Image (tube, helix red, strand yellow):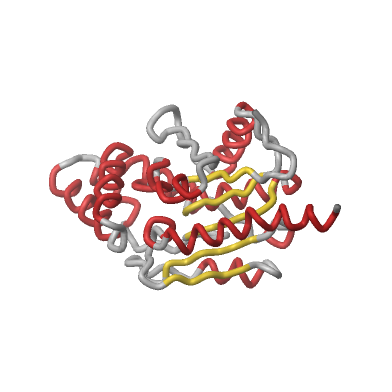
């Protein structure tokens, strides 16, 4: 069934590793039971893409196969945020709103050896234990039950998939198109991210007039898992914005 007239369809788009399956959106799926959270190809089934555009086109085909054409509110995390942003820039008429978390519009600056760290982990043994320990540390603010589920997701998806997704993220660069963005935009950053990344979200906020920038304390790399009530409130606002605009038109 397609999106009903007057209704926006919420689509939740995951990232690599523990974000590499729809399990990371548990609290959003509970709050918005009509939301869609597809598992991207290569996570765990199918073949992954080496660039964001490949995932974006796959997502559009997937949504159309499920009867959803336009009226979309896209919420993404890391890789998923890049996909959501690329979708809104490529097909602006189909997107009613964007919520982007832990995202950059340009290649990220990573610590030396961070990509090789994932490939080393794939050999097993101590490198794998170190990788899993670092992934657990990234989930510092996630409640224990969900944290354990996401660590299992890490294990299933694996370090090679995470490596490949990070490469795809680092190839994404929307700086030459960001001024074309028309959809209402909310950016969310966890200010206590253990990785202490550059404030990439601020760069996007400054480039998009009218965008909203939310910084959450006691949230790190996974704001939607760590501060779900706050993230859900932002999603509800984006979903309501479309309806409010339509009421004004009547």
Count of all numbered marks drawn on residues in the image = 0
Name which quarter of the figure residue 114 lies in. Answer: bottom left
Residue visible at 79% across and 54% down?
247
Of 27 and 179, nearer the camera is 27
Between 74 and 31, the residue placed more toward the observer is 31
Q: Is residue 153 left or right of residue 45?
A: left
Tell me residue 101's x, y (percent). 50, 59
Q: Is residue 163 visible?
A: no
Closest to the observer, 102 or 167: 102
Q: Residue at x 61, y 68 (%)?
A: 212
Please name the residue shown 57% across and 70% down the image.
213
The answer to whether residue 234 is seen in the rendering is yes
- Above or below for 207 versus 29: below
* Location of residue 8 in the rendering, given as x and y in whole percent from the top left corner: 66, 46
The quadrant the N terminus occupies is: top right
Q: Tell which of 108 and 225 is nearer to you.
A: 225
Left/right of residue 226 with respect to residue 78 in the rendered view = left
Residue drawn at point x = 71 percent, y = 57 percent? 181
Position of residue 30 relative to residue 143, above or below, is above
Say whether residue 70 is left or right of residue 172.
right
Residue closest to the far right: 250
Residue 26 image position (x, y, % from top left) = 40, 46
Q: Position of residue 188 (x, y in %)?
A: 51, 64
| Residue closest to the far left | 125
- Left or right of 148? Residue 209 is right
């Amino acid at each position: 069934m397609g999106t009903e007239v007057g209704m926006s369809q919420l689509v939740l788009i995951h990232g690599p590793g523990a974000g590499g399956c729809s399990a990371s959106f548990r609290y959003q799926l509970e709050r918005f039971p009509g939301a869609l959270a597809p598992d991207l190809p290569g996570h765990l089934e199918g073949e992954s893409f080496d660039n964001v555009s490949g995932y974006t086109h796959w997502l559009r085909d997937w949504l159309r196969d499920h009867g959803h054409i336009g009226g979309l509110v896209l919420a993404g995390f890391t890789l998923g945020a890049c996909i959501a942003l690329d979708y809104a820039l490529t097909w602006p008429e189909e997107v009613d709103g964007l919520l982007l978390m832990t995202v950059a519009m340009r290649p990220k600056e990573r610590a030396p050896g961070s990509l090789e760290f994932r490939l080393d982990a794939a050999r097993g043994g101590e490198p794998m234990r170190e990788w899993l320990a670092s992934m657990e540390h990234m989930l510092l603010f996630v409640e224990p039950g969900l944290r354990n589920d996401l660590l299992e997701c890490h294990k299933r998806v694996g370090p090679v998939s995470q490596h490949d997704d990070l490469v795809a993220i680092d190839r994404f660069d929307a700086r030459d198109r960001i001024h074309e963005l028309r959809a209402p935009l909310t950016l969310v950053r966890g200010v206590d991210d253990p990785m202490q990344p550059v404030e990439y979200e601020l760069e996007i906020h400054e480039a998009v007039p009218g965008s909203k920038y939310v910084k959450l304390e006691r949230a790190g790399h996974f704001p939607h898992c760590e501060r779900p009530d706050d993230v859900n409130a932002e999603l509800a606002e984006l979903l309501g914005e479309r309806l409010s605009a339509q009421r004004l038109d009547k």
